[in-house]
Amino acid sequence: MLKNLQMQRTKLSLILFLALILTMMLAAGVLAADTTITLQLNNPNMTINGTSRPIDEAGTTPTTINGRTMLPLRAIAESLGLTVDWDAESQTITLRSADANSDNIQPGEPTTDEPVNGGKILVAYFSATNNTEGIANHIAAALGADTYEIIPETPYTSEDLNYGNSSSRTSIEMNDPAARPAISGSLANMADYDVVFLGYPIWWGQAPKIICTFLESYDLNGKIIVPFCTSSSSDIGSSATNLHSLADEATWLEGHRFSGGTTQTEVANWANSLNLMLTADR
Ligand SMILES: Cc1cc2nc3c(=O)[nH]c(=O)nc-3n(C[C@H](O)[C@H](O)[C@H](O)COP(=O)(O)O)c2cc1C
């Protein structure tokens, strides 16, 4: 019994002694303080040196898309003491260590020509009366993305858009599952994009048929598609999920509905909350 107590005391003294040595070494700069960060798929919390905290205010979680693990780069980098700057205009992320004189990272110099994740972003949209176009431009401005307007070969007149007339062009098209209104021109460099925001107005609860034409015109395999819409009052409902089968090798994110007058700031908050830029391993 007495012997056990003595052994425990000896162990405790040894641990205290080692801790003292470690503290002295850290203070002298002999050792760098280690940081251990643990993240878990689909968990909005991360653990830093054993202490759990939310990854960010948006509730971002590490996730897997097309077999690749997407990690919240900003949260990780900042936990390691780096500063993270995102420049939407040039689409660059710059990570800086605390030591601004580091030989490896030149302050102010972008570290890469492309966002770490997501790659190039396209905002493709159809807009008959410009509401959706306004939102598309807000998204593009927020993310530094390119835009592509889906223009009908035969433009929609106000009579075509008359939903009170069951014989109007839109009434007929929307009642015809096979309708595929032709698009004027095409986008030559679709292959360059990894993320495609796809915007449309809600017509009788659904996406206009020209969106089907668009989806069937391109190889969207492996791309991330983010649907968004504008409407008078309807939610996005089944309008986006009904499109999935037209590009079933793409990864479809949840769609979002905006009213026509949504502000740039509100749209930017939504676009940034998707964290398409500040994730890694793509
Ligand atoms: C043919 C047609 C059908 C529509 N159907 C709906 C609807 O089902 N629900 C709704 O809230 N708004 C509906 N709207 C209103 C549009 O969704 C809304 O005005 C939208 O913002 C228009 O976008 P745009 O200006 O980009 O074309 C409809 C408009 C038209 C022309």
Image: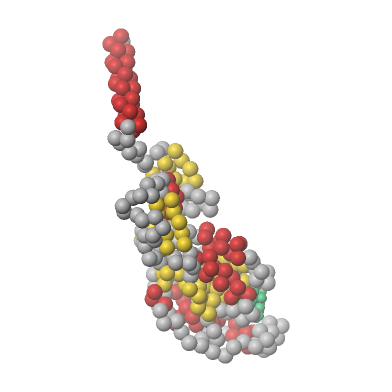
Colouring:
secondary structure
59 and 142: which one is in front? 142
Q: Is residue 237 above or below residue 181?
A: above
Q: Position of residue 89 (x, y in %)?
A: 48, 67
Q: Residue at x 66, y 69 (%)?
A: 261
Q: Position of residue 242 (x, y in %)?
A: 53, 72
Tell me: 166 left or right of 146. right
Q: Is residue 177 visible?
A: no
Q: Is residue 95 visible?
A: yes
Total labels drawn:
0
Dividing the picture into quarters, in which one does residue 28 lie? top left
Outermost top residue: 2
Dividing the picture into quarters, in which one does residue 7 lie? top left
Tell me: 276 left or right of 10. right
Outermost front residue: 101
Ligand 1 found in image quarter: bottom right
Where does the N terminus fall, quadrant-wise? top left
Where does the C terminus fall, quadrant-wise? bottom left
Q: Position of residue 99 (x, y in %)?
A: 37, 47
Q: Is residue 57 above or below residue 119?
A: above
Q: Is residue 112 above or below residue 242?
A: above
220 and 21: which one is in front? 21
258 and 136: which one is in front? 136
Outermost right residue: 164
Q: Residue at x 48, y 70 (%)?
A: 145
Q: Position of residue 173 (x, y in %)?
A: 59, 85
Q: Residue at x 39, y 69 (%)?
A: 222
Q: Residue at x 53, y 63 (%)?
A: 271
Q: Is residue 27 above or below residue 143?
A: above
251 and 278: which one is in front? 278
